[in-house]
Image: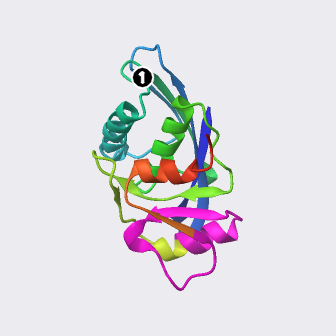
Amino acid sequence: MATAHGIVILNEKPEKFSITARVVPDGDGHLYLKGRVTDEWPTTFGPVVAAINKISDLMELNMDCADIMLRLETPYNYPLAGGSYALAAGMAILASADKKIIPSSNCYTGCLDKDGLIKDVQDIHRKRRGAAGFGYRRLFLPKGQIDLFSTLIAQCPVGNLADAYGITFWNEK
């Protein structure tokens, strides 16, 4: 299992969420979900699955028939909405399949497209302040949204899911 953390904006205020993934390689290709999501969730999660399939091939991880179990923990049991959770979901799934533990001091925000490219998110300034306020040490964010003048938190600008994964685990053998 692997857990990735992220930041959402609820009622104009940053809140943290987590996504825990467990991948069973010899499954039937099912997705199991525990937690609340909105009606738009299938639309925003589709690109996550496509990106995972593309990157897992490069990493030589067998995900063809894998069962993926996701547990979403959101503040006030609020349904997960929008696409900015996608980078955290992708990281949790890949790390679980690769049997890695994501540092709990990392926080992820970014939308994913089917090729694994990270797209901009809304309210990035609030998310940056929120991540720092919650005590995260590193915020992974779309590379076009870095604030060169912010000293609140270490920012890790990334352009795709593979880069985020590589930077997260760069010092591991």
Q: What residue span does the magenta drawing correspond to?
A: 127-154
> Circle 1: is it few (<14), some (14-19), or many (20+) Cα within 10 Å?
some
Q: Which residue is at a point 37% across and 38% down the rendered structure image?
A: 55
Residue 74 is situated, as x and y percent measured from the top left of the image, at 59, 50
Could you tell me if residue 159 is visible in this image?
A: yes
Q: Which residue is at a point 61% across and 40% down the rendered structure image?
A: 173
Foreground pick, 78 / 4: 4
On whether residue 144 falls in the magenta region, the answer is yes
96, above or below 87, in the image:
above
Residue 160 is situated, as x and y percent measured from the top left of the image, at 38, 54
Residue 109 is situated, as x and y percent measured from the top left of the image, at 48, 59
89, above or below 30, in the image:
below
**In this view, which residue lies farthest toward the bottom?**
149
Identify the image's colour scheme: rainbow, by chain, secondary structure or one colour.
rainbow
Horizontal relation, residue 29 to residue 76: left or right: left
Q: Which residue is at a point 62% across and 44% down the rendered structure image?
A: 172
94, above or below 11, in the image:
above
Q: Amino acid at mark 1?
A: Asn
Q: Secondary structure at mark 1?
A: loop
**The N terminus - image quarter:** top right
Q: Mark 1 — residue?
A: 62
Could you tell me if residue 80 is visible in this image?
A: no
Q: How many marks?
A: 1
**In this view, which residue lies farthest toward the front?**
173
Horizontal relation, residue 56 to residue 103: left or right: left
Q: Which residue is at a point 37% across and 42% down the rendered structure image?
A: 48
Residue 89 is situated, as x and y percent measured from the top left of the image, at 48, 44
**In this view, which residue lies farthest toward the right?**
135
On whether residue 109 falls in the magenta region, the answer is no
